Amino acid sequence: MSSQNSTGTVTQLRIVGIRFHKIGKLYHFDSTMHPDVQPGDYVIVETTRGRQMGQVMGFAEPEESREYKPILRKATPRDLLLKQAWQEREVGALIRCREAAAQSGGYEEVKFIAAQYNYDGSMLTFLYSCDTDHKAPNMNKLHAKLRRHFRNTKIEMRQIGPRDAAKLLGGYGACGQPRCCSTFLTDFSPISIKMAKAQGISLNPSEITGMCGRLRCCLVYEYEQYVEARKHLPKRNKRIGTPLGEAKVIDVHPLQDAVTVLIEGKRHTFSREELIPLAEWEALQKKAQAGCDKNENGDCDCR
């Protein structure tokens, strides 16, 4: 994909992926006018939320019929120092927000998660979550109070979901390891209860619910492998043939490529290679017993 500049020269677009937070989603911008920009560099870009500083994570192929905002400039050492200085004020800003909310009243069901300055301190965003069982209160009163306190700074109140809140708070998951969302997940995939069913996981809420109160992100990791493995195995309660005779499937082990069957009240486990499709086996037996159909009297001298 290429573009034509004011002089009529055709240039190849140079698209880069930029991340604004350590574990955040990638956004793509045009770096054609800044050919010296390389992965790892910090740059200044214009976004829907004002000017932001982000880090270049790598290059990407441009997509047809899509417009990309250009990189404004590379970040200077002064920009980096400013960003660090404003980041150090974020905890104090969050405390001030919580105090103002308590004084105003009516925000008991709201959890204020974080305060984030942009790199030059011109914008301050307060991230909050609200219990889904309660309607989010009107934030105008609190917004006005914070605007009076943080003069010369644009204030934004932004509601986030429980998964994003857990991502910001960090901590450990039920597995005893740091939460996936806080370590490497840059985006959240759709997760449904059928993913737990396909993997034979107990549907007990404590088994499938994460610290955020939503279905665990890890349910999606092996789901496709389970679905593919189950395609080649018989379902529960199906009659099959085994080396020990006819049996009924009582459990399926997709990752072991095996099933557990019940034969005369005893449990046996067989791999897929040891199983005999009973319907096919019975059809073959029936054909063998029927005799040759080439002669009317059933006699056969076929070799």
Image (spheres, grey):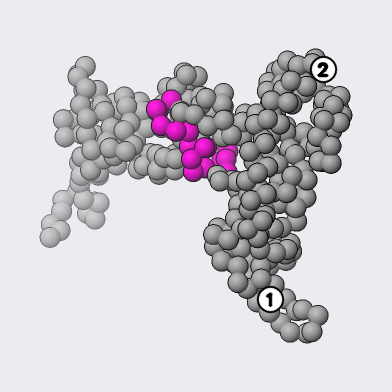
**Furthest residue toward bottom:** 8
Question: As shown in the figure, which amino acid type bears the numbered disc 1?
Answer: Ser
Q: Which residue is mark 1?
A: 2
Inspect the magenta stretch and tell me whether residue 184 lies in it: yes
Q: Residues within 10 Å of mark 2 (few under 14, many from 20)?
A: few
Side (left or right) of 194 relative to 28: left
The answer to whether one can see residue 54 in this image is no
Percent across and percent down for residue 114 are 66, 32
Side (left or right) of 183 relative to 36: left
Disc 2 element: helix
Disc 1 element: strand
Q: Label for residue 240?
A: none
Front label number (1 vs 2): 2
Inspect the magenta stretch and tell me whether residue 203 lies in it: no
Asked if residue 278 is positioned above or below residue 249 in the image, the reply reads: below
Question: As shown in the figure, which amino acid type bears the numbered disc 2?
Answer: Ser
Asked if residue 119 is positioned above or below residue 230 in the image, the reply reads: below
Quadrant in which residue 290 is drawn: top left
Tell me the magenta residue range.
174-190
Q: Which residue is mark 2?
A: 104
